[in-house]
Image: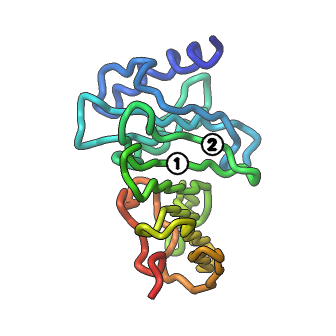
Amino acid sequence: MRLIIILLCLFPTFAAAENPYISASQVLGFIATDLTGDGHKEHVVLYDLVESPSSGIVLTIWERGDGDEWLNARFSEDFAQSNGPDREPELRLAENGSVEVHSFSAADNPANWEKTLTVAHRHLDGREYPSYLVVGLKYEWNYGDKSGDRRTCEINLLTGRGELTRGTEQKVEVFTSSLAPESTDGWPRDMIPEQCFGG
């Protein structure tokens, strides 16, 4: 009930994103956490903009203003993928306080992939102010018809360190990625670095 009340308080201001109404059934995830480290919790909402399929799944982040109002600090369209009612994207809170956005393949997809994007509030080179960035990427999938070959590619975009785990023996290969952190509203939804697929 508390979650619904909070969301209903937020919905009227979604009009600023050219969306006159968001129903509770469109909300896929909600997390209140202090991403900026200023002692105040931001509200992170993941929802399905069903009336605008081109916008897809939207990630929006709200910050408390000077008064009691909430300000839409970030509106990121087409940020995650939805592949059926039982494969909707999810929001999760990471142990370090970052927010994770999980997308899943369709249930009948043999690859049975899962993609996780980690979002944090950091400074981006060349910008004066910190921003909400994608700072981590994890992609897991079944490789071909090889039984037991579940592959995992994980990249820390802040350090450039990547790890690819593959094969029935789950061998770990370390690599360096040139992929840099990117603002959530500029992140390509289908971005999977080639290094994740190895040689």
**Residue nearest the viewer, comparing 18 with 146:** 146
Which amino acid type corresponds to the residue marked 1 in the rendered image?
His
Coloured how?
rainbow
**Residue nearest the viewer, comparing 57 with 43:** 57
**Residue nearest the viewer, comparing 174 with 41:** 174
Q: Position of residue 157 (x, y in %)?
A: 57, 72
Disc tally is 2
Question: How far is the residue under mark 2 from the one under mark 1?
Answer: 8 Å
Residue in view at x 57 percent, y 64 percent? 135
* Rendering quarter of residue 189: bottom left
Per the image, label 2 sits on a secondary structure element best described as strand
Work out whether 45 lies above or below 142: above
Near mark 1 (Cα within 10 A), the count class, few <14, some 14-19 or many ≥20, is: some
> Is 155 on the left or on the right of 56, as rendered?
right
Residue in view at x 59 percent, y 34 percent? 43
Near mark 2 (Cα within 10 A), the count class, few <14, some 14-19 or many ≥20, is: some
Per the image, label 1 sits on a secondary structure element best described as strand
Q: Which residue is mark 2?
A: 92
Residue in view at x 40 percent, y 40 percent? 58
Which amino acid type corresponds to the residue marked 2 in the rendered image?
Arg
> Is 177 on the left or on the right of 19, as rendered?
right
Mark 2 and mark 1 residues within 8 Å of each other at the beta carbon = yes
> Is 19 on the left or on the right of 100, as rendered?
left
**Residue nearest the viewer, comparing 130 with 31:** 31
Quadrant placement of the C terminus: bottom left
Residue in view at x 65 percent, y 80 percent? 172
Q: Position of residue 60 (x, y in %)?
A: 47, 39
Q: Earlier in the sequence, mark 2 or mark 1?
A: 2
Quadrant placement of the N terminus: top right
Q: Position of residue 147 (x, y in %)?
A: 52, 66
Work out whether 75 lies above or below 161: above
Q: Which residue is mark 1?
A: 102
